[in-house]
């Protein structure tokens, strides 16, 4: 039986790893996590994907055994839903900050990394990702986001980065992924998209 070690992995990594196992055709697998929210998210995923799941706990480590064959799971408020929607590629992601939200900066930076990890791990990719203002720091300075953006580019997602903003922050020479762009191109991408998601 396949074993997935998701201990110490932040949300939504355990769910994504389980989804990848399911998409890979695994009829039964074991995943280990070390926090209760991950357990609840994985139980919900199992129910939505037609898997039975049993949970064992020892010393704060939870082992969840997935097996094909149904079984309802309790609802929870996290994003461990049914399968990802069919790819549309008619949307654009606009990033105007280097963090998500207005609370703690460290938390906001981690949430932004998780956003790009989740985006790159999914099947419904955007047509483009647009960076302006402090958002341009991500494709220049954040190692984790850079790797996720490289993955997105390799899969056909256009990454445009505001040149004026790079110059303002003095990091034009540090851009590691994406095309240096301008307001005209960025607005054109927004206008051609069926929707724009701002983070």
Image: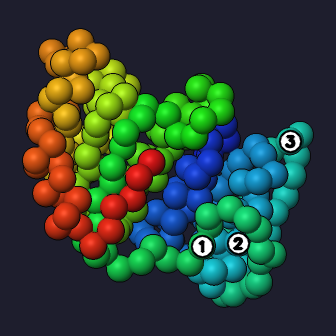
Dot label at residue 98: none
Residue drawn at x 62%, y 64% is 79
Q: Is 169 placed above or below 105 here?
A: above
The x and y percentages for residue 83 are 49, 77
Q: Mark 1 highlights which residue?
A: 81
Query: Which of 67/114 is in front?
Result: 114
**Furthest-top residue in view?**
170
Q: Position of residue 15 (x, y in %)?
A: 59, 59
- Image check: 96 left or right of 34? left
* Of the two numbered discs 1 and 3 in the rendering, the one whose residue sits closer to the viewer: 1
| Mark 1 and mark 3: Cα distance apart in space | 25 Å
- Indicate which disc, 1 or 3, sits on the residue closer to the N terminus: 3
- Does residue 141 appear in this view? yes
Percent x, y of residue 54? 79, 69
Residue 138's image quarter?
top left
Q: Please report contact status of discs 2 and 1: CB closer than 8 Å, yes or no.
A: yes
Nearer the observer: mark 2 or 1; the answer is: 1
**What residue is rendered at 33% in x and 54% in y?**
93
Residue 132 or residue 140, whichever sits in front: 132
Label number found at residue 44: 2
N-terminal of the pair, mark 2 or mark 3, is: 2
Q: Position of residue 128 (x, y in %)?
A: 22, 55
Residue at point 89%, 40% (across, down): 59
Please tell me which residue is depicted at 50% across the width and 71% down the height of the picture.
Answer: 22
Q: Secondary structure at mark 3?
A: loop
Return the mark for residue 60.
Answer: 3
Q: Residues within 10 Å of mark 2 (few under 14, many from 20)?
A: many
């Amino acid at each position: 039986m396949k074993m997935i070690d998701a201990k110490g992995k932040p949300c939504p990594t355990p769910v994504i790893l389980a989804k990848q196992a399911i998409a890979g055709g695994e009829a039964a697998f074991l995943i280990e996590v070390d926090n209760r929210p991950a357990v609840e998210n994985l139980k919900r995923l199992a129910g939505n994907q037609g898997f039975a799941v049993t949970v064992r706990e020892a010393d704060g480590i939870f082992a969840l055994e997935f097996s094909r064959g149904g079984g309802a799971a309790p609802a929870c408020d996290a994003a461990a839903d049914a399968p990802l929607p069919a790819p549309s590629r008619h949307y654009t992601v606009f990033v105007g900050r280097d963090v998500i939200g207005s609370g703690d900066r460290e938390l906001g930076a981690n949430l932004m990394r998780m956003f790009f990890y989740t985006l790159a791990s999914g099947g419904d990719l955007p047509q483009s990702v647009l960076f302006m203002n402090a958002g341009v720091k991500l494709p220049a300075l954040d190692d984790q986001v850079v790797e996720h953006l490289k993955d997105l580019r390799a899969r056909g997602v256009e990454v445009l980065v505001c040149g004026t903003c790079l110059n303002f922050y003095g990091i034009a020479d540090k851009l590691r992924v994406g095309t240096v762009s301008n307001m005209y191109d960025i607005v054109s991408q927004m206008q051609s998209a069926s929707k724009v998601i701002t983070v």
